[in-house]
Image (spheres, rainbow, N blue to C red):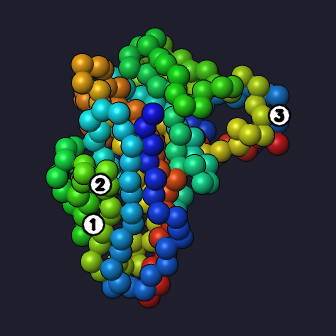
Amino acid sequence: GNSVTQMEGPVTLSEEAFLTINCTYTATGYPSLFWYVQYPGEGLQLLLKATKADDKGSNKGFEATYRKETTSFHLEKGSVQVSDSAVYFCALSDHIAGGTSYGKLTFGQGTILTVHP
Amino acid sequence: DAGITQSPRHKVTETGTPVTLRCHQTENHRYMYWYRQDPGHGLRLIHYSYGVKDTDKGEVSDGYSVSRSKTEDFLLTLESATSSQTSVYFCAIKPGEGNTEAFFGQGTRLTVV
């Protein structure tokens, strides 16, 4: 079956530090990969996505590259801000050739990020 | 705003009672989902729907049932609530076909005492 593994948190950084949150996956078909962010008390918001190998997703200074050879989709940001403090989820939606994709998401366990001034 | 409304937003109920959570969308999207969020597990799929009266089980469907009699509403029912069903429940919708992104509601925090 499909699975997503994220680096364990919590992650605590100072403002302007470099951020990496590792994500690796296992999928049987041709997955699309996503990073979602959840701010306190809110639902999940899509941060970025990539739909095929070597695609780079980017948004709000965050980036992640779909690496099929290493089955990874690591999230990076060059300079974090206090406002980036949130929970980050890596997720995949699989598609099997010749089959129907229902868009079901498989999530990692989430990584709590805290950024201090 | 993806036009998703979950109700109620918070609920406390007693063990053994039935509970129904509602997800309402305003965009007439075909695909709707119910997930639960628990510490250390991320989000896990309970049930999903791909059209009116078309539903299927997800990863953690035991103890839950769903109904979709109208495109805009997807109901999740806990037939007899247990403490293990204390969780935050999220509804999601997915516009379009294929592996496009899903959009999530604000969540319902359910506590079973």
> Which residue is identified by label 1?
A62
The relative height of residue A90 versus residue A117 in the rendered view (above or below) is above
Query: Of label 1 and label 2, which has the lower sequence position?
Result: 1
> Mark 3 to mark 1: distance in Å?
43 Å
> Which residue is identified by label 2?
A70
Q: Secondary structure at mark 2?
A: loop
Asked whether the residues under the numbered discs 3 and 1 touch, taking CB atoms below 8 Å apart as contact, a structural biologist would say no
- Left or right: residue B16 compared with residue A106: right
Which of the 4 image quadrants contains residue B8? top right
Q: Tell me whether marks 3 and 1 sit on the same chain.
A: no
Q: Position of residue A110 (x, y in %)?
A: 49, 57
- Left or right: residue A70 compared with residue B81: left
Q: Nearer the viewer, residue A19 or B93?
A: A19
Q: Nearer the viewer, residue B97 or B24?
A: B97
**If the image is split into quadrants, where does the C terminus of chain A sit?**
bottom left
- Who's the residue at 49% across and 73% down the image? A11
The relative height of residue A2 versus residue B65 in the rendered view (above or below) is below
Residue count near mark 3 (Cα–Cα under 10 Å), binned few <14, some 14–19, many ≥20? some
Which of the 4 image quadrants contains residue A81? bottom left
Q: Position of residue A69 (x, y in %)?
A: 25, 51
Callout 3 amino acid: Thr
Tell me if I can see residue A84 in this picture.
Answer: yes
Callout 1 amino acid: Phe
> Which residue is identified by label 3?
B15
Residue count near mark 1 (Cα–Cα under 10 Å), binned few <14, some 14–19, many ≥20? some
**If the image is split into quadrants, where does the N terminus of chain A sit?**
top left
> Mark 1 to mark 2: distance in Å?
20 Å
Q: Position of residue B109 (x, y in %)?
A: 63, 46
Q: Tell me whether marks 3 and 2 sit on the same chain.
A: no
- Left or right: residue B11 compared with residue A117: right
Q: Position of residue B98 (x, y in %)?
A: 25, 29
The furthest residue to the front:
A69
